[in-house]
Image (cartoon, helix red, strand yellow):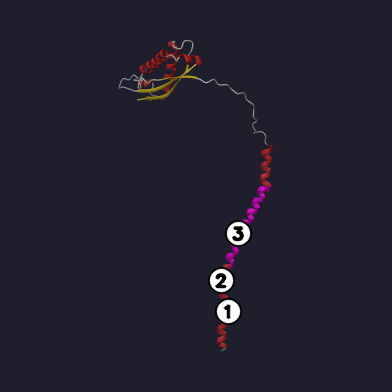
């Protein structure tokens, strides 16, 4: 019986020793996780205190004291802009124009707007005969201009100047003049 008691005691001590071996292993992992969480929380608190107590006040003082980059508002006078007198040349009778070309028949669909020097000149164009004459001058210039002289965007500026010069030289507007030519639509094929 003594042997049996010794055996039982030995088995119990081995079981206790095995339990003790496992317990530190689990408790060590738990202790490490708790320690890591506490360190992270501590770092967060320290970073918050440093930023709010040290960095932000210095930054605010620098911004408030810096008046070099500040732009002061200046009162400005209102500029009165007179609306432009714009006359639109309507090619509804001839929907497509044919510019000159050596190789094939070309087609031009265009909507023109003439900027006039005054509203009095614009009121003169209310006359149907004068408007038809102005449309005829523009049509003649567009149909006699060679295709190769207007197929690039850069060349259209010279076409604008040509239209403005010819309309002003025609004398249709009397004392008035054209100050700008604009293409609202310019489709060339």
35 is within the stretch colored magenta? yes
Q: Earlier in the sequence, mark 1 or mark 3?
A: 1
Left or right: 8, with 148 as reference point: right
- Position of the N terminus, as image quadrant, is bottom right
Asked if residue 117 can be seen in this view, the reply is no
Label 3 sits on a secondary structure element that is helix
**Label at residue 22:** 2
Predominant SS of the magenta segment: helix
Q: Residue at x 68, y 47 (%)?
A: 54
Label 2 close to label 3 by CB (< 8 Å): no
Contact between marks 2 and 1 (CB within 8 A): the answer is: no
Task: Identify the image quadrant of residue 31.
Answer: bottom right
Q: Which mark is residue 83?
A: none
Q: Is residue 22 above or below residue 94?
A: below
Q: Does residue 25 appear left or right of residue 138 in this picture?
A: right
Residue range corresponding to the magenta coloring? 27-53
Which residue in the structure is indicated by mark 3?
37
What is the x, y in percent for residue 28? 59, 66
Under tag 2, what secondary structure?
A: helix
Q: Which residue is mark 1?
A: 13
Front disc: 2 or 3: 3
Image location (x, y in percent) of residue 109: 37, 23
């Amino acid at each position: 019986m003594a042997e049996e008691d010794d055996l039982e005691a030995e088995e119990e001590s081995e079981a206790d020793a095995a339990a003790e071996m496992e317990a530190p292993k689990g408790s060590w992992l738990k202790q490490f996780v708790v320690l890591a969480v506490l360190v992270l929380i501590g770092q967060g608190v320290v970073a918050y205190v440093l930023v709010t107590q040290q960095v932000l006040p210095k930054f605010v003082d620098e911004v408030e004291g810096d008046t070099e980059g500040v732009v002061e508002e200046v009162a400005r006078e209102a500029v009165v802009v007179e609306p432009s007198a714009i006359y639109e040349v309507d090619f509804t009778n001839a929907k497509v124009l044919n510019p000159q070309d050596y190789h094939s028949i070309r087609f031009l669909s265009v909507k023109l707007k003439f900027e006039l020097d005054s509203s009095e000149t614009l009121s003169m164009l209310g006359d149907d005969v004068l408007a038809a004459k102005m449309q005829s001058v523009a049509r003649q210039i567009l149909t006699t201009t060679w295709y190769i002289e207007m197929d690039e965007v850069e060349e259209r500026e010279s076409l604008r100047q040509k239209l403005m010069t010819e309309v002003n030289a025609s004398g249709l507007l009397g004392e008035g003049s054209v100050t700008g030519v604009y293409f609202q639509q310019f489709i060339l094929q």
